[in-house]
Image: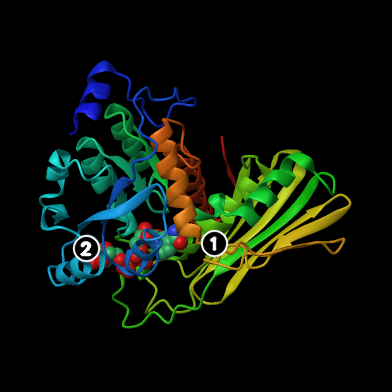
Amino acid sequence: MDNRRAFLKKSGLLIAASTVSFPQLLFARPEKKLGVALVGLGYYSRDLLAPALQLTEHCELRGIVTGTPDKIPVWQAKYGIVDKNVYNYENMHEIAENDDIDVVYIVLPNALHKKYTIIAANAGKHVWCEKPMAPTVKDCEEMIAACKKNKVQLTIGYRMQHEPVTQKIISMAGTKPYGMIQKLKAEAGFYNSGGDGTHWKLHKELAGGAMFDMGVYPLNAVRYTTQMEPLSVSARIENSRPELFKADETTFFDLEFPGGILANCKTSFAENMNHLKVDCQSGWYELKPFQSYSGVAGKTSDGQIVSPFRGNQQARQMDDDALAIKQGKAPLVPGEEGLKDIRIVEAIFESSNKGSKRILL
Ligand code: NAD
């Protein structure tokens, strides 16, 4: 730990991430890039996050944690990662002694998010954790508690909340250009062939399934679009390929919000869908697609077109989150936001199992 962090920790000036307001850190050095270590070098780390970290202004890729030794020379050669910044899952806690690393980004199967978030937090590192936060509310609460205890930030990788076109739609919950929202439709999915059936995303053990993988996008979208929390949920699961999909293949969930606002949501591994539509008293607006890596585009009932953002979503997300750490401010998407979705996901599975509406308290 460098002297500055040690001093801040000792003096109590390094403030826990999850509190609502963040006093400016007295000794913040805004010019310094934060060092990020990626944990799990699968698809999302390899194809999206590592390339995006070459574009960031406030953070950079400095470390990796992997259980696959073959990947190490490839990543070291491509990104200039030095030997002392390479870890495996058994020695990852030793990152505590490494001043090169400020942030540990968990990009693992969903059911492993809790374990490695807690290891990273106990090592005194800020944690970015991919969506969905974790399989259960209890897991999410333990992750938040570990980060609070260690006075580090915890941020969930909901990239859409950082995306400018999406942010315009979020702002319309306040400006209400077409009056009060009356109903919403949100659908996200893709055709997943299932391959040989072994990938963790097809199985319940590591919290695979369409709801955890893609369903959190429509769920999060109807929450950020309305800026409200749902009062109840009714859900139903369909599985047309039970020999392949051992977790949910298609999940329908209808949410009731205050004021009688209804949101019809769907997620699936059986069809391509990517649409958010918002019907209001005197018009409508939509994003199509609403959760792709690029090209998120808006349209309104009176013919306005919102052009897609041309930058890199993941770079913007990581820069926002790095800046929050450097400036000692609350992150845009804290652990508590991930927890809110998982509380509803639990209710979605319960409603589907029981075949009845579930009231959310
Ligand atoms: P992936 O299967 O491609 O990669 C997972 C990595 O975890 C692999 O490198 C694998 O070797 C490693 N791993 C470690 N322990 C494992 C175990 N016990 N079983 C299986 N793999 C293990 O998955 P991915 O698509 O990169 O997803 C990783 C995380 O990123 C998930 O939480 C996912 O939801 C999230 N994700 C987010 C986005 C986004 O747009 N925000 C996009 C894709 C994935």
x, y (%) of residue 268?
52, 70
Which residue is located at x 41 percent, y 76 percent? 242
Q: Is residue 27 above or below residue 114?
A: above
Q: Amino acid at mark 1?
A: Gly
Whether residue 23 is visible to the viewer of this picture, yes or no, is yes
Closest to the observer, 3 or 182: 3
- Could you tell whether 40 is left or right of 268 in the image? left
Residue 52 drawn at (x, y percent):
41, 61
* Quadrant into which the N terminus falls: top left
Depth order, front residue of 141/96 = 96
Query: In the depicted view, which residue is nearer to us: 32 or 282?
Result: 32
Above/below status of 62 relative to 243: above
Quarter assignment of residue 141: top left
- At 85% from the left edge and 45% from the top edge, which residue is drawn? 179
User: Dot 2 corresponds to which residue?
Assistant: 80
Q: Is residue 83 left or right of residue 253?
A: left
Mark 1 lies on residue: 311
